[in-house]
Image (tube, coloured by chain):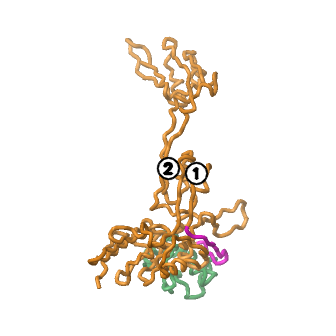
Chain colours: A green, B orange
Amino acid sequence: MELKVNQDNCLGCGVCVVACPVNVSISPEVAGGHGSKTEETIMMVENGVIKLFSEDKCTKCGTCQVFCPVDAIWLE
Amino acid sequence: MVANTKEVIEEDICVSRSSADEKREWSYKDELCVGCGICADICPVDAIELEPIGGIVRTGAKKSKISIDENKCVLCGMCSVGCPADALDLKIDNKSIKEMDSYPKLIKSAEIDDETCVFCKACETACPREAITIARSLPERSKLVTGEIEIDKETCIDCGICEEMCPADAITLSHQIPTSADPSVSSDIVVDKDKCVYCLICKKSCPVDAIKAACRTCSYGEYDLNPEDAEIEGSSFIDDDLCINCGWCQEICPVDAATVKKAFKGELNIDQDKCTTCGACVDICPCDVLSFPKPADSGQIVDKVFKDEKYCIYCGACGKVCPVEAIDVKRTDVDYTPTKSNSWKNKMESLKS
């Protein structure tokens, strides 16, 4: 399984960024919705769309896909 | 050396090896797999890998929860013996090693004693795996309450109030458009005495007192009732394939008719500080042990994840799925039938942590 994103579908809401349990443990401020201060997180919203940074850290728990309202991030 | 062959049917997998002496067949049923990864841990040749179970279970992906390298697999069957969900099996010449005394097996069971069971179906409702079926036949209602009822059709004005009021749907009026030949709005009124419970609501609500009714049970009480007529008969069935011996049936049974024996003892520890409430463990747990607690009052701070450990089988699936290593499942005891082989013994003991 691989983590995939579709930037054309992305709303830029960032719910995946704050829901991702790995992101929160890497950069606790993302849980508060303040945006990550590091590119060590798995994904971030950049210029209004989602972008993957450290996707190798993904444990494939599926939380981002459960929360994404528009099928812009998923496991395949 | 004879090569193994692998067959994949949807999410199920089969690996087999046939030689002149014997035929070995390993099978995996994805529907039964709980994603605990014990098979991968116990495999002596590292042939099995646990796939990303969180993603597979939560997104409904059409993908097996484990993968097996048929070139590494030696078809020993150790994984099938360690599997707490009976998702794996090894057959030698069409006989499962779980039926052979020379192989160890986990000592686990779930039983419902039909003599004690009152067939209330609480276990059927509670079972997280829908493994229990309770079949029951109820007594005939007409034998539990008796009485007399009569409608005087001369007095009856066909208003239909009794039909509408009857809680047992025992009264039926045949409604019709009146004609000059038959200037009434009903051709007949019928009481189904098998359905009638002699509650007398029709009699009390009839505007023209056309109904005479009496309840014998009210007059004579219990004396009117034959206890045999009130008996509920039934039988219980536990699907051993689906059952994972979680113990919900035993806990919920009001008459202690269910007995569950678990193979593992242990501890389930959750680090509430590390938990990020992603819910992967709650979704993966096959025993409904984990849940998100709701605060009783507003402003009350509760644990992030609640555990009800009496239903835990210590399979470890939650620990494997947790993305932030907040869950630690310890197995302190593994109950299995004896075996002479030291290798098997060592592997069974290795399930303890």
Residue designated by label 2: B236
Q: Quadrant of the N terminus of chain B?
A: bottom left
* Residue kind at label 2, given as amino acid type: Ser
Q: Is residue B90 left or right of residue B250?
A: left
Q: Which residue is located at x 54 percent, y 51 percent?
A: B113
| Cα–Cα span, label 2 and label 1 | 10 Å
User: Is the residue under label 1 in contact with that under label 2 (CB below 8 Å)?
Assistant: yes
Q: Chain of mark 2?
A: B
Q: Earlier in the sequence, mark 2 or mark 1?
A: 2
Nearest the viewer among A19 and B327 is B327
Q: Chain of mark 1?
A: B
Secondary structure, mark 1, is loop
Residue designated by label 1: B257
Q: Which residue is located at x 63 percent, y 23 percent?
A: B220
Q: Find out whether residue B275 is within the magenta segment.
A: yes
Q: Quadrant of the C terminus of chain B?
A: bottom right
Which range of residues does the magenta coloring cover? Answer: B263-277
The answer to whether B111 is drawn above or below residue B2 in the figure is above
Whether labels 2 and 1 belong to a single chain: the reply is yes
Q: Find out whether residue A43 is within the magenta segment.
A: no
The answer to whether B252 is drawn above or below residue B286 in the figure is above
Secondary structure, mark 2, is strand
